[in-house]
Image (cartoon, coloured by chain):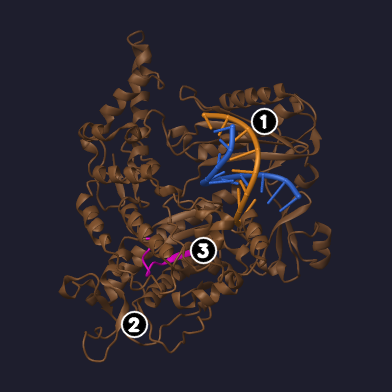
Chain colours: A brown, B orange, C blue
Amino acid sequence: MSSSQPFQASSPLSASGGRQKKSRFTYRHLAQLALSSVSCPLRVIAHADLDAFYAQCEMVRLGVAEDQPLAVQQWQGLIAINYPARKFGLNRHVTITEAKKQCPNLICQHVATWKEGESKWAYHPDAEKNISTHKVSLDSYRLESRRILACIKESLPANMQRVEKASVDEVFCDLSAQVHSILLERFPELAGPAPYDDPTENLPLPPSTALDWKADALVDLDPQETEDDDPDWDDYAILVGSEIIRQVRADIFEKLKYTCSAGIAQNKMLAKLGSAHKKPNQQTVIRNRAVQRFLSDFTFTKIRGLGGKLGEQITSSFNTDTVKDLLPVSIEQLKNKLGDDTGTWVYQIIRGNDHSEVNSRTQIKSMLSAKSFRPSINDAEQARRWLRIFVSDIYSRLVEEGVLENKRRPKTMNLHHRSGGQTKSRQAPISLGRKIDEAGLFEIATNLLGQIILEGKVWPCANLSLAVGGFEDGVAGNMGIASFLVKGDEAKALSARDSDAGEARPEKRRRVVPTTGIGRFFKTDSAEEQHDEDFGAHLSGGIDTLADIESKTAKVDDTATSDSSHEDEATKFDQQAAISSEKSALHQQRTTEFMCSRCSAAFECPETLQNHQDWHFATDLEAEERKQPASKPSAILPNNKSSAASIKKKARHSQPEKGQSKLKFG
DNA sequence: GTGGATGAG
DNA sequence: CGCTCATCCAC
């Protein structure tokens, strides 16, 4: 993809000397770009958002014309309205009859539903009349979401992509590594070495020819900037990112006929604001030199994480809801009102600084099936009937998740109940010994219901929801050994696990950077996590590179990131984030897949592949036992600790080697 | 670990 | 509005 659209190749970059000015950016900044460092000023993040997604799904499914007004109906309400229909002034809170009146040509398609006693959801023509016996199913949208995500991954180079599924209709892509490689292709001079081998040397400026932004929406520049200023490498980087995303969008449309909007910027927060800026089917670029202007026009409650109570609290504390009016508020005032962590986070975010990382994660962590009862239900028998439907729904989705092949397995089940204003919930483990099927799940769910009923005051019940979760850890018993060890034991652990050397860092031990909410921003840099990072580095055999980064980050070159108005806090923030993120970048798992040699199931990380192969092994043993019973029945139970450990140890030696290829075989 | 709360779409 | 999904926090 990268080479399919040759860029206007330039004459060689002007050498140093003469009257040529230097770039604001250094060779180190360029190197950080290749690592997708969250503090790299050249970083390129994209956010893509499907246009009126549910409505588009129905249009594709039904094959209706692109200019046909269509809305997705759920009982008596509309949950999605396509853009042709929006021209008639329709919004989500109009009734069906009003909508039809305003737009006589409107197609109102009801969502698919589960009907009691049936084994699969379907598009029932009479669904809206059967609210009391049907429950909504959003499965078809989840399936389309999955196809689109796969298409996006196909569109991006396997070894450089970093794609995070943010919701059913949104993704973030960290394009930094790919942009880096394209820059080097187009401007081989950038490959270095830096003059005097000094990474703090500034890069030569890019050619000053005007950049071709194609049809991209460009947001207005900051007041002190003009379009006449020569572009610098951040402009080029984001332009390349924009080209990449334009091609991704074209691929999605060509293959699947879905349109989406996108935002391209230096971080997730700005990219997301960008994708919402112009819809439908457009992309918006927010250059660094436009960030201040772009942001200051916003109501800060539009910023991700400030849409709820926190935003309200800020509004009432400082008597404004605009970014512009919040900018003069000092970091101390923010800390006083909001607490240190949240105050610092808000201070940074309204200045366009967001170091949150794009996690290569495309799999869900929990699933839930729920219904609000109108009217309420009044006895346990009715509740159990709904539990059957919830279980069918969840079970079929578990099958899609590959639970049957032991690719993933939920650890817990949760039942929520609402009666009047009161809510109750009960959770239970799904023990490893239990085979996951509809009967087993229903039994657990029924038990939870029984526990809730025992509390009393449960009828009439207005809402029930059943959830399963705890997917990410796979088979129990393999929880991070590292977290149990004190310093002295690490050597033992390392030698015991020496065949792990060269492995990518397991998914489940990876640092999670929170993206929303109060006071969560700095929590992940705890000493414990830091320790874990180090441990991961040993395991990964990345010592040289890590040490390299440690020494590099010892003196922080801040030419382009800090502006003189930043306070010490802000600088410290940048530096801390830079260091931890570079380490994290080293261990960040890409969407590289690990494939089982037995059944070709694919996994995102070696450890889950290991769990899966342990399961094969245990299954084989079990089959053997059935042929020759009475030898050692206890040893084959999957929840037998010692057995699990020995199986693990045995299978571990067949783990794949680290490498760059897309597929690995175990 | 559990249950509630918050936030987002 | 109804239905999801994710994460954090007090207990």
What residue is drawn where x is 27% and y is 28%?
Answer: A649
- The answer to which of marks 1 and 2 sits earlier in the sequence is 2
Q: Which residues are magenta?
A: A38-46
Task: Specify the amino acid type for callout 3.
Answer: Ile
What residue is drawn where x is 46% and y is 22%?
Answer: A433
| Left or right position of A459 against A336 | right
- Identify the disc placed on residue A387: 1
What residue is drawn where x is 50% and y is 59%?
Answer: A345
Can marks 1 and 3 be said to lie on one chain? yes
- Residue neighbourhood size for the residue with mark 2, other residues' Cα within 10 Å, grouped as few (<14), some (14–19), many (≥20): few
Check disc 2 and report the residue beneath it.
A8
Check disc 3 and report the residue beneath it.
A331
Task: Specify the amino acid type for callout 2.
Answer: Gln
Tell which of A382 and A427 is nearer to you: A427
- Real-space Cα separation, disc 3 to disc 2, in angstroms: 44 Å
Q: Chain of mark 1?
A: A
Q: Is residue A216 above or below residue A624?
A: below
SS state under label 1: helix
Which part of the image, by quadrant, shows the C terminus of chain A? top left
A43 inside magenta stretch = yes
Q: Position of residue A519 (x, y in %)?
A: 53, 51
- Real-space Cα separation, disc 1 to disc 2, in angstroms: 61 Å
Q: Position of residue A320 (x, y in %)?
A: 66, 67
Task: Answer yes or no: is residue A36 visible.
Answer: yes
Q: Chain of mark 2?
A: A
